[in-house]
Amino acid sequence: MKIRRIVTYTLLASIAFLGMACSKEENLDKEIVGLGGEKWVKNEIDNYIYQTFTVPYNIDVLYRWTPSEVSFVNNLVPPQEDKIVPVMEMVKQGWIEPYIEIAGADFIKKFAPRQYLLVGSPEYNTSGTITLGTAEAGAKIVLYRVNWFDLKDRDLVQAMLKTIHHEFAHILHQTIMYPREFEAITPADYTSTWNQVSVTDARNKGFISSYAMSAPDEDFVEIAAIMLTQGYQPFENIISSISNADGVQKIRQKQQIVLNYFRQTWNINLYDLQAKTEAAINKLSPPPSAFERLGFGRSNSVLFTSVTTDETNWSAKFKESFQTASSSLGTLGNAGRYLEDVNVIYYQQGKMMLRLKYRNPANPTSVFNADFRFDYTEEPTTKRSTFTYVGTSTDLNSTAGGNANTIRTYVADLLNYFDGKTFHYGWSDGGAYPTDFAKMIREDDATNYIYGLLRNTY
Protein backbone atom coordinates (compact mmCIF):
# COMPACT_ATOMS: atom_id res chain seq x y z
CA MET A 1 0.00 0.00 0.00
CA LYS A 2 2.84 2.42 0.74
CA ILE A 3 4.26 1.94 -2.72
CA ARG A 4 0.94 2.66 -4.36
CA ARG A 5 0.49 5.87 -2.36
CA ILE A 6 3.96 7.08 -3.23
CA VAL A 7 3.32 6.44 -6.92
CA THR A 8 -0.06 8.20 -6.69
CA TYR A 9 1.33 11.25 -4.91
CA THR A 10 4.16 11.51 -7.37
CA LEU A 11 1.76 11.39 -10.29
CA LEU A 12 -0.47 14.13 -8.80
CA ALA A 13 2.54 16.30 -8.09
CA SER A 14 3.72 15.81 -11.66
CA ILE A 15 0.34 16.82 -13.05
CA ALA A 16 0.35 19.95 -10.88
CA PHE A 17 3.84 20.81 -12.02
CA LEU A 18 2.92 20.33 -15.66
CA GLY A 19 -0.08 22.55 -15.18
CA MET A 20 2.15 25.31 -13.86
CA ALA A 21 4.70 24.74 -16.57
CA CYS A 22 2.07 25.07 -19.30
CA SER A 23 1.15 28.51 -18.03
CA LYS A 24 4.59 29.85 -18.96
CA GLU A 25 6.19 30.41 -22.33
CA GLU A 26 9.25 28.19 -22.71
CA ASN A 27 12.15 28.36 -25.18
CA LEU A 28 11.88 24.97 -26.93
CA ASP A 29 15.10 25.42 -28.86
CA LYS A 30 17.36 24.71 -25.88
CA GLU A 31 19.70 21.68 -26.03
CA ILE A 32 18.27 18.62 -24.30
CA VAL A 33 20.71 17.25 -21.73
CA GLY A 34 21.17 13.56 -20.95
CA LEU A 35 19.75 11.98 -24.11
CA GLY A 36 23.01 11.48 -25.91
CA GLY A 37 23.47 7.90 -24.73
CA GLU A 38 26.17 6.49 -22.47
CA LYS A 39 29.42 8.42 -22.60
CA TRP A 40 32.74 6.75 -21.86
CA VAL A 41 36.36 7.29 -22.73
CA LYS A 42 38.20 4.62 -24.69
CA ASN A 43 40.74 2.73 -22.64
CA GLU A 44 43.50 0.20 -23.33
CA ILE A 45 40.95 -2.62 -23.61
CA ASP A 46 39.03 -0.73 -26.30
CA ASN A 47 42.22 0.01 -28.20
CA TYR A 48 43.23 -3.65 -27.99
CA ILE A 49 39.83 -4.80 -29.31
CA TYR A 50 39.90 -2.24 -32.12
CA GLN A 51 43.41 -3.07 -33.31
CA THR A 52 43.22 -6.85 -32.79
CA PHE A 53 39.68 -7.66 -33.93
CA THR A 54 37.85 -4.71 -35.45
CA VAL A 55 40.47 -3.45 -37.90
CA PRO A 56 41.64 -6.82 -39.31
CA TYR A 57 38.39 -8.83 -39.08
CA ASN A 58 35.55 -6.32 -38.56
CA ILE A 59 34.69 -7.99 -35.22
CA ASP A 60 33.44 -5.90 -32.32
CA VAL A 61 33.65 -7.08 -28.71
CA LEU A 62 30.96 -5.90 -26.30
CA TYR A 63 31.98 -6.10 -22.68
CA ARG A 64 30.45 -3.03 -21.04
CA TRP A 65 27.25 -4.13 -19.37
CA THR A 66 24.19 -3.59 -21.55
CA PRO A 67 21.19 -5.43 -20.06
CA SER A 68 19.21 -5.22 -23.30
CA GLU A 69 21.82 -7.41 -25.00
CA VAL A 70 21.25 -10.40 -22.70
CA SER A 71 18.44 -12.49 -21.25
CA PHE A 72 15.77 -10.72 -19.21
CA VAL A 73 14.75 -14.04 -17.67
CA ASN A 74 17.97 -15.25 -16.03
CA ASN A 75 20.28 -13.47 -13.63
CA LEU A 76 23.61 -12.70 -15.24
CA VAL A 77 26.80 -11.03 -14.05
CA PRO A 78 28.90 -8.47 -15.97
CA PRO A 79 32.42 -9.47 -17.00
CA GLN A 80 35.41 -8.30 -14.99
CA GLU A 81 37.57 -5.95 -17.01
CA ASP A 82 40.81 -7.77 -16.14
CA LYS A 83 39.45 -10.89 -17.87
CA ILE A 84 38.61 -9.26 -21.22
CA VAL A 85 42.02 -9.24 -22.88
CA PRO A 86 43.06 -12.74 -21.67
CA VAL A 87 39.76 -14.23 -22.89
CA MET A 88 39.97 -12.53 -26.26
CA GLU A 89 43.62 -13.57 -26.65
CA MET A 90 42.40 -17.12 -26.17
CA VAL A 91 39.76 -16.51 -28.87
CA LYS A 92 42.41 -15.15 -31.23
CA GLN A 93 45.00 -17.86 -30.65
CA GLY A 94 42.63 -20.82 -30.27
CA TRP A 95 40.08 -20.01 -32.99
CA ILE A 96 41.04 -17.19 -35.39
CA GLU A 97 44.70 -18.00 -35.98
CA PRO A 98 44.24 -21.75 -36.62
CA TYR A 99 41.50 -21.02 -39.17
CA ILE A 100 43.67 -18.39 -40.84
CA GLU A 101 46.56 -20.85 -41.12
CA ILE A 102 44.32 -23.43 -42.80
CA ALA A 103 41.67 -21.40 -44.63
CA GLY A 104 43.15 -17.91 -44.91
CA ALA A 105 42.37 -14.52 -43.41
CA ASP A 106 39.59 -13.81 -45.93
CA PHE A 107 37.67 -16.82 -44.60
CA ILE A 108 37.54 -15.32 -41.11
CA LYS A 109 36.76 -11.85 -42.48
CA LYS A 110 33.84 -13.26 -44.45
CA PHE A 111 32.27 -15.70 -42.00
CA ALA A 112 33.26 -14.58 -38.52
CA PRO A 113 30.43 -13.17 -36.39
CA ARG A 114 30.38 -9.38 -36.32
CA GLN A 115 30.17 -9.23 -32.54
CA TYR A 116 31.31 -11.06 -29.44
CA LEU A 117 29.31 -10.35 -26.31
CA LEU A 118 31.08 -11.28 -23.08
CA VAL A 119 29.14 -12.26 -19.95
CA GLY A 120 30.76 -12.87 -16.58
CA SER A 121 28.62 -15.78 -15.40
CA PRO A 122 26.99 -18.84 -16.93
CA GLU A 123 23.30 -18.68 -17.81
CA TYR A 124 21.46 -21.13 -15.58
CA ASN A 125 18.26 -22.51 -17.07
CA THR A 126 15.13 -23.80 -15.33
CA SER A 127 15.69 -27.20 -16.94
CA GLY A 128 18.84 -27.64 -14.86
CA THR A 129 21.13 -27.04 -17.84
CA ILE A 130 23.68 -24.24 -18.30
CA THR A 131 24.02 -22.13 -21.44
CA LEU A 132 27.70 -21.67 -22.25
CA GLY A 133 27.33 -19.81 -25.53
CA THR A 134 24.91 -18.79 -28.25
CA ALA A 135 25.16 -17.68 -31.86
CA GLU A 136 22.54 -15.27 -33.16
CA ALA A 137 21.97 -15.72 -36.89
CA GLY A 138 25.69 -15.75 -37.52
CA ALA A 139 25.98 -12.13 -36.39
CA LYS A 140 26.87 -12.43 -32.71
CA ILE A 141 28.39 -15.00 -30.36
CA VAL A 142 27.61 -14.67 -26.68
CA LEU A 143 30.36 -16.14 -24.52
CA TYR A 144 29.57 -16.83 -20.86
CA ARG A 145 31.73 -17.65 -17.79
CA VAL A 146 34.28 -14.94 -18.54
CA ASN A 147 34.84 -14.24 -14.84
CA TRP A 148 35.86 -17.86 -14.31
CA PHE A 149 38.64 -17.66 -16.89
CA ASP A 150 42.08 -18.89 -15.83
CA LEU A 151 44.70 -20.21 -18.23
CA LYS A 152 45.81 -22.67 -15.56
CA ASP A 153 42.39 -24.30 -15.77
CA ARG A 154 42.87 -26.29 -18.96
CA ASP A 155 39.44 -27.89 -18.75
CA LEU A 156 37.82 -24.44 -18.70
CA VAL A 157 40.00 -23.19 -21.56
CA GLN A 158 38.99 -26.19 -23.67
CA ALA A 159 35.35 -25.78 -22.70
CA MET A 160 35.27 -22.09 -23.66
CA LEU A 161 37.02 -22.76 -26.97
CA LYS A 162 34.64 -25.65 -27.57
CA THR A 163 31.77 -23.19 -27.20
CA ILE A 164 33.35 -20.90 -29.80
CA HIS A 165 34.09 -23.69 -32.28
CA HIS A 166 30.61 -25.11 -31.68
CA GLU A 167 28.91 -21.78 -32.43
CA PHE A 168 31.15 -21.05 -35.42
CA ALA A 169 30.32 -24.45 -36.90
CA HIS A 170 26.66 -23.43 -36.60
CA ILE A 171 27.45 -20.29 -38.61
CA LEU A 172 29.09 -22.41 -41.32
CA HIS A 173 26.25 -24.91 -41.70
CA GLN A 174 23.69 -22.10 -41.59
CA THR A 175 25.54 -20.61 -44.55
CA ILE A 176 25.74 -23.89 -46.50
CA MET A 177 23.85 -26.85 -45.04
CA TYR A 178 25.51 -30.18 -44.38
CA PRO A 179 24.13 -33.29 -46.17
CA ARG A 180 20.75 -34.46 -44.90
CA GLU A 181 22.03 -38.04 -44.72
CA PHE A 182 23.69 -37.01 -41.44
CA GLU A 183 20.45 -36.87 -39.46
CA ALA A 184 19.31 -40.20 -40.94
CA ILE A 185 22.00 -42.09 -39.00
CA THR A 186 20.26 -41.82 -35.59
CA PRO A 187 16.86 -40.28 -36.42
CA ALA A 188 14.87 -41.84 -33.58
CA ASP A 189 17.27 -40.96 -30.75
CA TYR A 190 17.16 -37.17 -30.78
CA THR A 191 15.43 -35.99 -27.63
CA SER A 192 14.52 -32.83 -25.73
CA THR A 193 15.48 -34.60 -22.51
CA TRP A 194 19.11 -35.04 -23.57
CA ASN A 195 20.24 -33.64 -20.20
CA GLN A 196 18.88 -36.79 -18.55
CA VAL A 197 21.15 -39.04 -20.63
CA SER A 198 24.64 -39.83 -19.38
CA VAL A 199 27.62 -39.28 -21.66
CA THR A 200 28.31 -43.03 -21.64
CA ASP A 201 24.76 -43.88 -22.71
CA ALA A 202 24.79 -41.15 -25.36
CA ARG A 203 27.98 -42.50 -26.88
CA ASN A 204 26.68 -46.04 -26.86
CA LYS A 205 23.72 -44.75 -28.89
CA GLY A 206 25.99 -43.08 -31.44
CA PHE A 207 26.38 -39.51 -30.13
CA ILE A 208 29.67 -37.88 -29.21
CA SER A 209 28.06 -36.06 -26.23
CA SER A 210 24.76 -35.91 -24.41
CA TYR A 211 23.99 -32.48 -25.89
CA ALA A 212 24.49 -33.92 -29.37
CA MET A 213 21.24 -35.81 -28.80
CA SER A 214 19.23 -32.57 -28.63
CA ALA A 215 19.02 -32.04 -32.42
CA PRO A 216 20.81 -32.97 -35.66
CA ASP A 217 22.39 -29.50 -35.93
CA GLU A 218 23.83 -29.82 -32.41
CA ASP A 219 24.99 -33.34 -33.18
CA PHE A 220 26.86 -32.11 -36.25
CA VAL A 221 28.64 -29.20 -34.58
CA GLU A 222 29.48 -31.17 -31.43
CA ILE A 223 31.61 -33.59 -33.47
CA ALA A 224 33.52 -30.73 -35.08
CA ALA A 225 33.93 -28.80 -31.81
CA ILE A 226 35.09 -31.80 -29.78
CA MET A 227 37.54 -32.85 -32.48
CA LEU A 228 39.00 -29.34 -32.59
CA THR A 229 39.34 -28.83 -28.85
CA GLN A 230 40.29 -32.29 -27.60
CA GLY A 231 42.92 -33.05 -30.22
CA TYR A 232 43.49 -36.14 -32.33
CA GLN A 233 44.56 -38.79 -29.81
CA PRO A 234 42.20 -37.73 -27.01
CA PHE A 235 39.31 -37.85 -29.49
CA GLU A 236 40.39 -41.33 -30.54
CA ASN A 237 40.58 -42.27 -26.86
CA ILE A 238 36.93 -41.24 -26.53
CA ILE A 239 35.99 -43.51 -29.41
CA SER A 240 38.01 -46.44 -28.06
CA SER A 241 36.32 -46.09 -24.67
CA ILE A 242 32.85 -46.75 -26.14
CA SER A 243 31.76 -50.31 -25.39
CA ASN A 244 28.93 -50.52 -27.92
CA ALA A 245 30.27 -51.32 -31.41
CA ASP A 246 27.09 -50.00 -33.03
CA GLY A 247 27.54 -46.68 -31.23
CA VAL A 248 31.13 -46.45 -32.48
CA GLN A 249 30.05 -47.17 -36.04
CA LYS A 250 27.39 -44.45 -35.95
CA ILE A 251 29.77 -41.85 -34.56
CA ARG A 252 32.33 -42.77 -37.21
CA GLN A 253 29.68 -42.39 -39.92
CA LYS A 254 28.81 -38.95 -38.62
CA GLN A 255 32.45 -37.97 -38.26
CA GLN A 256 33.11 -38.89 -41.89
CA ILE A 257 30.26 -36.68 -43.05
CA VAL A 258 31.66 -33.81 -40.97
CA LEU A 259 35.13 -34.36 -42.46
CA ASN A 260 33.72 -34.47 -45.99
CA TYR A 261 31.62 -31.37 -45.39
CA PHE A 262 34.55 -29.26 -44.26
CA ARG A 263 36.74 -30.49 -47.10
CA GLN A 264 34.20 -30.31 -49.93
CA THR A 265 32.32 -27.21 -48.83
CA TRP A 266 35.05 -25.06 -47.32
CA ASN A 267 38.26 -26.69 -48.61
CA ILE A 268 39.35 -27.31 -45.03
CA ASN A 269 41.09 -30.49 -43.95
CA LEU A 270 39.61 -30.85 -40.47
CA TYR A 271 42.51 -33.00 -39.29
CA ASP A 272 44.95 -30.23 -40.27
CA LEU A 273 42.80 -27.68 -38.47
CA GLN A 274 42.62 -30.02 -35.49
CA ALA A 275 46.43 -30.15 -35.30
CA LYS A 276 46.58 -26.35 -35.29
CA THR A 277 43.95 -25.92 -32.58
CA GLU A 278 45.51 -28.65 -30.45
CA ALA A 279 48.91 -26.96 -30.66
CA ALA A 280 47.33 -23.61 -29.81
CA ILE A 281 45.55 -24.99 -26.74
CA ASN A 282 48.70 -26.74 -25.56
CA LYS A 283 50.56 -23.44 -25.84
CA LEU A 284 47.83 -21.45 -24.10
CA SER A 285 47.27 -23.94 -21.30
CA PRO A 286 49.83 -26.76 -21.25
CA PRO A 287 48.38 -30.13 -20.24
CA PRO A 288 49.14 -31.19 -16.68
CA SER A 289 51.83 -33.75 -16.11
CA ALA A 290 50.94 -37.13 -14.65
CA PHE A 291 52.93 -36.06 -11.57
CA GLU A 292 50.50 -33.16 -11.08
CA ARG A 293 47.50 -35.49 -11.28
CA LEU A 294 48.73 -38.45 -9.21
CA GLY A 295 49.52 -38.16 -5.53
CA PHE A 296 48.11 -37.30 -2.15
CA GLY A 297 45.69 -34.36 -2.33
CA ARG A 298 45.67 -34.37 -6.13
CA SER A 299 43.04 -35.34 -8.68
CA ASN A 300 43.93 -39.01 -8.31
CA SER A 301 45.48 -40.76 -5.34
CA VAL A 302 45.76 -44.30 -6.76
CA LEU A 303 47.49 -45.94 -9.70
CA PHE A 304 45.86 -49.34 -10.26
CA THR A 305 47.11 -52.07 -12.57
CA SER A 306 45.96 -55.64 -13.12
CA VAL A 307 47.44 -58.66 -14.82
CA THR A 308 44.01 -59.37 -16.33
CA THR A 309 43.62 -56.01 -18.08
CA ASP A 310 46.95 -54.19 -18.26
CA GLU A 311 49.71 -56.75 -18.70
CA THR A 312 50.09 -56.01 -22.41
CA ASN A 313 50.99 -52.40 -21.52
CA TRP A 314 53.55 -53.23 -18.84
CA SER A 315 57.22 -52.73 -19.49
CA ALA A 316 59.12 -55.99 -19.86
CA LYS A 317 61.07 -55.35 -16.65
CA PHE A 318 58.04 -54.61 -14.49
CA LYS A 319 56.33 -57.65 -15.96
CA GLU A 320 59.34 -59.74 -14.99
CA SER A 321 59.25 -58.45 -11.39
CA PHE A 322 55.52 -59.09 -11.15
CA GLN A 323 55.73 -62.62 -12.56
CA THR A 324 58.70 -63.51 -10.36
CA ALA A 325 56.79 -62.37 -7.26
CA SER A 326 53.61 -64.14 -8.36
CA SER A 327 55.43 -67.40 -9.07
CA SER A 328 57.22 -67.22 -5.73
CA LEU A 329 53.92 -66.60 -3.95
CA GLY A 330 52.59 -69.77 -5.52
CA THR A 331 55.14 -71.80 -3.54
CA LEU A 332 53.76 -70.59 -0.21
CA GLY A 333 52.35 -73.78 1.29
CA ASN A 334 52.35 -75.14 -2.27
CA ALA A 335 48.85 -73.63 -2.52
CA GLY A 336 49.31 -71.99 -5.90
CA ARG A 337 48.48 -68.48 -4.75
CA TYR A 338 49.00 -65.84 -7.44
CA LEU A 339 49.11 -62.07 -7.73
CA GLU A 340 46.34 -60.31 -9.62
CA ASP A 341 46.39 -56.54 -8.98
CA VAL A 342 48.78 -53.85 -7.78
CA ASN A 343 47.64 -50.58 -6.19
CA VAL A 344 50.01 -47.68 -5.60
CA ILE A 345 48.07 -45.68 -2.97
CA TYR A 346 49.08 -42.20 -1.84
CA TYR A 347 47.07 -42.11 1.40
CA GLN A 348 48.92 -39.43 3.38
CA GLN A 349 51.46 -36.78 2.52
CA GLY A 350 54.77 -38.63 2.33
CA LYS A 351 53.20 -42.07 2.75
CA MET A 352 52.46 -44.60 -0.01
CA MET A 353 50.78 -47.97 0.43
CA LEU A 354 51.64 -50.72 -2.03
CA ARG A 355 48.59 -52.95 -1.91
CA LEU A 356 49.04 -56.34 -3.58
CA LYS A 357 45.88 -58.28 -4.34
CA TYR A 358 46.17 -62.03 -4.70
CA ARG A 359 44.01 -65.13 -4.93
CA ASN A 360 44.14 -68.62 -3.45
CA PRO A 361 42.83 -71.38 -5.77
CA ALA A 362 41.40 -73.09 -2.69
CA ASN A 363 39.11 -70.06 -2.24
CA PRO A 364 38.59 -68.84 -5.82
CA THR A 365 35.85 -66.29 -5.10
CA SER A 366 37.93 -64.31 -2.59
CA VAL A 367 40.56 -61.66 -3.19
CA PHE A 368 43.15 -61.08 -0.45
CA ASN A 369 44.89 -57.76 0.22
CA ALA A 370 48.45 -57.35 1.47
CA ASP A 371 49.57 -53.85 2.41
CA PHE A 372 53.19 -52.66 2.45
CA ARG A 373 54.02 -49.13 3.54
CA PHE A 374 56.57 -46.88 1.89
CA ASP A 375 57.61 -43.37 2.77
CA TYR A 376 58.25 -41.05 -0.14
CA THR A 377 59.79 -37.69 -0.87
CA GLU A 378 58.92 -35.48 -3.83
CA GLU A 379 60.97 -33.10 -5.93
CA PRO A 380 58.31 -30.69 -7.29
CA THR A 381 60.74 -28.95 -9.62
CA THR A 382 61.82 -32.12 -11.42
CA LYS A 383 58.46 -33.87 -10.74
CA ARG A 384 60.04 -36.98 -9.26
CA SER A 385 59.30 -39.21 -6.26
CA THR A 386 61.63 -41.47 -4.28
CA PHE A 387 60.24 -44.37 -2.22
CA THR A 388 61.61 -46.06 0.88
CA TYR A 389 60.20 -49.33 2.22
CA VAL A 390 59.03 -49.11 5.84
CA GLY A 391 57.35 -52.45 6.44
CA THR A 392 54.03 -54.25 6.46
CA SER A 393 51.15 -52.09 7.54
CA THR A 394 47.69 -52.04 9.03
CA ASP A 395 47.17 -48.34 8.25
CA LEU A 396 44.38 -49.00 5.75
CA ASN A 397 43.23 -52.46 6.78
CA SER A 398 44.18 -54.62 9.76
CA THR A 399 43.75 -57.90 7.87
CA ALA A 400 45.82 -56.65 4.96
CA GLY A 401 48.71 -56.02 7.33
CA GLY A 402 48.58 -59.60 8.56
CA ASN A 403 48.47 -60.94 5.01
CA ALA A 404 51.48 -58.81 4.16
CA ASN A 405 53.44 -60.36 7.00
CA THR A 406 52.62 -63.79 5.59
CA ILE A 407 53.64 -63.16 1.98
CA ARG A 408 56.38 -60.54 2.43
CA THR A 409 59.40 -62.71 1.62
CA TYR A 410 57.65 -64.21 -1.40
CA VAL A 411 56.90 -60.87 -3.09
CA ALA A 412 60.31 -59.32 -2.42
CA ASP A 413 60.84 -58.59 -6.12
CA LEU A 414 57.92 -56.16 -6.17
CA LEU A 415 58.96 -54.52 -2.91
CA ASN A 416 62.47 -54.09 -4.27
CA TYR A 417 60.99 -52.61 -7.45
CA PHE A 418 60.05 -49.51 -5.42
CA ASP A 419 62.41 -49.54 -2.43
CA GLY A 420 65.09 -46.87 -2.78
CA LYS A 421 64.01 -46.08 -6.35
CA THR A 422 63.16 -42.73 -7.89
CA PHE A 423 60.34 -42.44 -10.41
CA HIS A 424 59.16 -39.82 -12.85
CA TYR A 425 55.72 -39.86 -14.41
CA GLY A 426 54.27 -39.93 -17.90
CA TRP A 427 50.98 -40.30 -19.71
CA SER A 428 50.08 -43.35 -21.74
CA ASP A 429 49.38 -43.17 -25.48
CA GLY A 430 52.54 -41.35 -26.40
CA GLY A 431 52.08 -38.53 -23.94
CA ALA A 432 48.55 -37.56 -24.99
CA TYR A 433 46.28 -35.97 -22.43
CA PRO A 434 43.52 -36.34 -21.33
CA THR A 435 43.74 -40.02 -20.57
CA ASP A 436 42.94 -42.12 -17.52
CA PHE A 437 46.19 -44.10 -17.75
CA ALA A 438 49.66 -43.13 -16.63
CA LYS A 439 53.14 -44.55 -16.19
CA MET A 440 55.50 -44.45 -13.24
CA ILE A 441 58.91 -44.66 -14.89
CA ARG A 442 62.08 -45.74 -13.08
CA GLU A 443 64.66 -42.99 -13.11
CA ASP A 444 67.48 -45.52 -13.41
CA ASP A 445 65.99 -47.08 -16.56
CA ALA A 446 63.50 -45.31 -18.83
CA THR A 447 62.39 -48.65 -20.29
CA ASN A 448 61.28 -49.87 -16.88
CA TYR A 449 57.84 -48.61 -15.82
CA ILE A 450 54.57 -49.56 -14.21
CA TYR A 451 51.46 -48.71 -16.24
CA GLY A 452 48.01 -48.34 -14.75
CA LEU A 453 44.66 -46.62 -14.35
CA LEU A 454 44.36 -43.43 -12.32
CA ARG A 455 41.56 -43.48 -9.80
CA ASN A 456 40.64 -42.73 -6.18
CA THR A 457 39.48 -46.13 -4.98
CA TYR A 458 41.50 -49.19 -4.03
Image: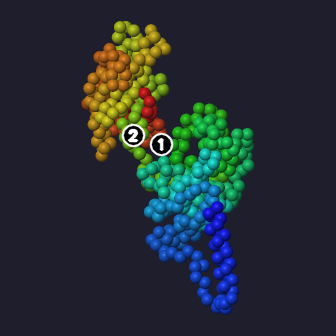
* Residue at the image position 40 percent from the left and 32 percent from the top: 302
* Residue 265 appears anywhere in the view: no
> Residue type at mark 2?
Arg
Q: Quadrant of residue 28?
A: bottom right
Residue on which the image places disc 1: 434
* Residue at the image position 31 percent from the left and 26 percent from the top: 373
Badge 1 vs badge 2, beta-carbon distance below 8 Å: no
Circle 2 packing at 10 Å, graded few (<14), some (14-19), many (20+), is few
Residue 107 vertical placement versus 416 (above, below): below
Circle 2: element type: loop
Q: Which mark is residue 298?
A: 2
Q: Say which quadrant the C terminus sits in.
A: top left
* Residue at the image position 53 percent from the left and 67 percent from the top: 64
Residue 40 vertical placement versus 97 (above, below): below
Considering depth in this image, is 28 or 408 the residue closer to the camera?
Answer: 28
Circle 1: element type: loop
